[in-house]
Amino acid sequence: MRSHYCGQLNETLVDQTVTLCGWVHRRRDHGGVIFLDMRDRDGIAQVVVDPDTAEAFANADRARSEFVLRIQGRVRLRPEGTQNPNMPTGMIEVLARDVDVLNTAATPPFQLDEHGKVGEEVRLKHRYIDLRRPEMIEKLRLRSRITHSVRAFLEGQGFLDIETPILTRATPEGARDYLVPSRTHAGNFFALPQSPQLFKQLLMVSGLDRYYQIARCFRDEDLRADRQPEFTQIDIEASFVDEDDIMAVTESMIRQLFRDVLAVELPEFPRMPYDEAMNRFGSDKPDLRIPLELTDVDDLMQRVDFKVFSGPAKADDGRVAALKVPGGATLSRKEIDEYTKFVGIYGAKGLAWIKVNERARGLEGLQSPIVKFMEDVVEELLDRLGAEDGDIIFFGADKARIVNEAIGALRVRLGEDLDLYTRRWAPLWVVDFPMFEDDGSARMQALHHPFTAPSCDVEALKANPIAALSRAYDMVLNGTELGGGSIRIHDPAMQRAVLEVLGIDEHEAREKFGFLLDALQYGAPPHGGLAFGLDRLVMLMSGARTIREVIAFPKTQSAACLMTDAPGEVSGEQLRELNIRLRQKAKAEVAGE
Ligand code: ASP
């Protein structure tokens, strides 16, 4: 139907006849002449309709915002003085010969260029209109270019695109499953995959050697932060590899992607052990664009007569860390109060600070509610931190976990608020994760997942599991975990040992993933892989503010789709077929009681 997209028109087409198809972005009546801004996926072009072309004029006259038109006409240069250099097609216009109304449109729930005035709910409810906005189209286009680049790279490296089931059994990635009742097996349920983890390992046992998939994953988590119940992973697995091989190939993939899509040459990816990342940045996904670091001051604070500090400094699971912010002495009382509230979100009971106004004047030159408690150690402290006039020093003193989370988050917040970024892109690998974490519950938890290989042997693992490190790695970019993976266990004895540490007995293991345990006995090759979160990657590369902006049809924070109204009720008959009866409470809720 069309010869050109609106956005493709330029001076080289002057005097040519073109056919455009699209939507009326705006219509203006200029004393007898009608101007139509026609919009399609590629951009906007100005169309002029003269009363001389009577039929075209009549059609243009009845056209309204978002009507669907087909326009045929001649490209001409805009008259001197009416050109618009801010618009890609701003030098030309189309003088219409024919205007066909292909469809009318009801008044849209919001004007595209006024989307900022309506809440996100309205936009999500009418997502098909929201997606007409050029900004949204650009994000989806970028997403498509990203998956294209990734596919081209992986295919070039011999990876095969293989689909794995959506109706399956639970995959242990640590979240709640979405369940689908089976009609043909009364009382039984499928789980939607939290990741293709077990299937990709089985493909390695089958000898497929190199697998990838742009895979949809489902996790029924409480959607605190910016998460989606269904999201997409770039899922990768390979055989006869070690961690260096996987890191090398995936790092090349990301480098190539940034070249292809953003024309950016990413800097070196340093490797940082997990322990170091936690100590220096309070996070296992440090944002290395921010030049602030946590400094341990436990040894100094053990000596002070101030329980709030000396307690955690002496405790095995405690930590006292200082964060020096150059130039931060200008922060106001109000701002500091705001940061105190902020660290409270992470469980910190307060936020101690020292402003270094004039170091040469000793204690006199310091301003702080707590310095009086640490007079004996303050010079040593300032030396260790290399404190200078104009700095502020913040402190976290609590359980190490709380200090890391709170001061780690404060570090990122200050980086953002004070615009301390030293560079645009800061990638790294975090390695040497612990195998397990003791979260205080009865069972030890796998930090990655139970199929991750430890870097020690079975005896060492059993003797001291909490000290065992894993062969896992995370790729981090600008403080976001882009992806994570590991070398897997291919030895059944090691797999049994890990499950034992996790408190998963033989019976439970067989029931949950007996098929994997069986497969490991039939010649499983050494293998490993990694998965990238595609949505987050697109978000980072497009500069989007939320993950919802880079997903065509996202769900809300409460895991619902406002457009289709999913999840929805089902009929009694459907439930009967599935052998499901709702509990009274659920029924009452459904009936709105
Ligand atoms: N299955 C893992 C995840 O979804 C990724 C991997 O280990 O490859 O986090």
Image: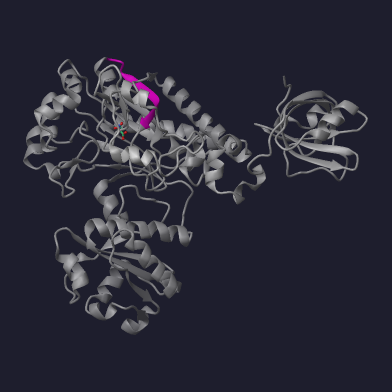
**Could you say where residue 426 lies in the image, as x and y percent from the top left?**
42, 46
- Asked if the stretch drawn in magenta spans residue 252, the answer is no
Indicate left or right for 348 with 110 as reference. left
Q: Is residue 377 visible?
A: yes
Q: Is residue 390 visible?
A: no
Taken as a whole, is the magenta stretch helix, strand or loop? strand
The image quadrant in which ligand 1 is located: top left
Quadrant of the rendering where the C terminus is positioned = top left
**Could you say where residue 293 lies in the image, as x and y percent from the top left?**
34, 59
In the foreground, 269 or 128? 128
**Could you say where residue 118 lies in the image, as x and y percent from the top left?**
59, 49
**Could you say where residue 11 lies in the image, as x and y percent from the top left?**
80, 32
Q: Is residue 103 above or below residue 324?
A: above
In the foreground, 356 or 180? 180
In the foreground, 192 or 308? 192
**The residue stretch that appears in magenta:** 207-217
The quadrant holding residue 373 is: bottom left
Which residue is rendered at x = 25% and y = 18% of the image?
185
The quadrant holding residue 372 is: bottom left
Which residue is rendered at x = 14% and y = 65% of the image?
314
Quadrant of the rendering where the N terminus is positioned = top right
